[in-house]
Image (cartoon, rainbow, N blue to C red):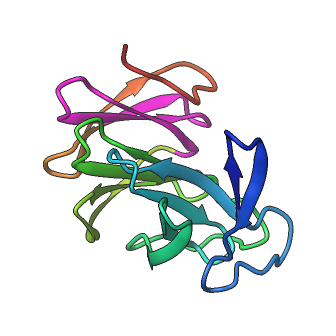
Amino acid sequence: MNVFDVKKRAFVKNIVLAKGSAKTGNGTGSESLTVTPDGKRMLVADNANNDIRVIDTATDTEVSSFALTDRAPSNVKRSRLVKLMFSPDGKHLVATTYASGQAWVIDAANYAKQSMVSIAKGPQGIAFAPDNKTALVTSQDSGLLTRIDLATGKADGVFDGGTGIEVLAYY
C-alpha cells in the first residue's frame, strides 16, 4: 500500500502489510479503507489475508490487525469487495463483504466486539442516519436496503431500493 503526500504531490512511502499480502491471483491486495474520526488511524481491508489492518497515520506503519468474526469463506483469487465506514459519532464501524452477503457492526473502541448481520446478496453502500442509531446497507444484486440497529447490531427492516443500488447518503 502506498502513501501519497498531497503537498509534495508524490508517493512517499510503501507500507508493507505485516502478514505479507502476497499477490496470489486476480483481485488480491488491499481494498477498502477508512480513516478513524480522529484521523489517527486508517483501516484497510487486506483482501489477500482476509483481515482488516490498522495503520497509524502519523508514522504510516501497521500497528494491529483484526479479522471479521464468523466470516463466510470466499475465493482468495477474487475480490471480496469489503466496504468499511465509521458512524459520524465515531462509536461504530460497519463493514460489509459483497461476496458473502454479510455485514458487521463493530465497537470502534474495541474491534473484537463485533455483531455479524446476514443481509441480502451483494452489499455495497453504507449510510448512517443523523441520529447515529441506524445504518442502512445497500445490496446491489438484490435491490434491497437493510436497516441495522447500531445498539443491538441486528437487522430490523428490509426495504425495496430498486435495481442496482450501490451507494446512498444522508444529507
The quadrant of the rendering that contains the N terminus is: bottom right
Q: Residue at x 37, y 25 (%)?
A: 159
* x and y, in percent, of residue 157 in the image: 27, 33
- The residue lying at 76 percent from left, 63 percent from top is 78
Q: Is residue 118 magenta?
A: no
Asked where in the image residue 64 lies, by quadrant, the reply is: bottom left
Closer to the camera, 128 or 69?
Answer: 128
| Left or right side of 117 for 76 | right
- Number of numbered labels in the structure image: 0
Please state which of residues 65 and 82 is positioned toward the viewer in this rendering: 65
Magenta region includes residue 130: yes
* Residue 114 percent location from the top left of the image: 28, 65
**Percent x, y of residue 107:** 24, 59
- 61 is higher (above) or lower (below) than 34: below
Which residue of the protein is positioned furthest toward the left in this rendering?
151
Looking at the image, residue 125 lies above or below residue 103: above
* Residue that lies at the very extreme toward the right in this rendered image: 26
Q: Which residues are magenta?
A: 121-147
Q: Is residue 82 visible?
A: no
Write down the quadrant of residue 12 in the picture.
bottom right
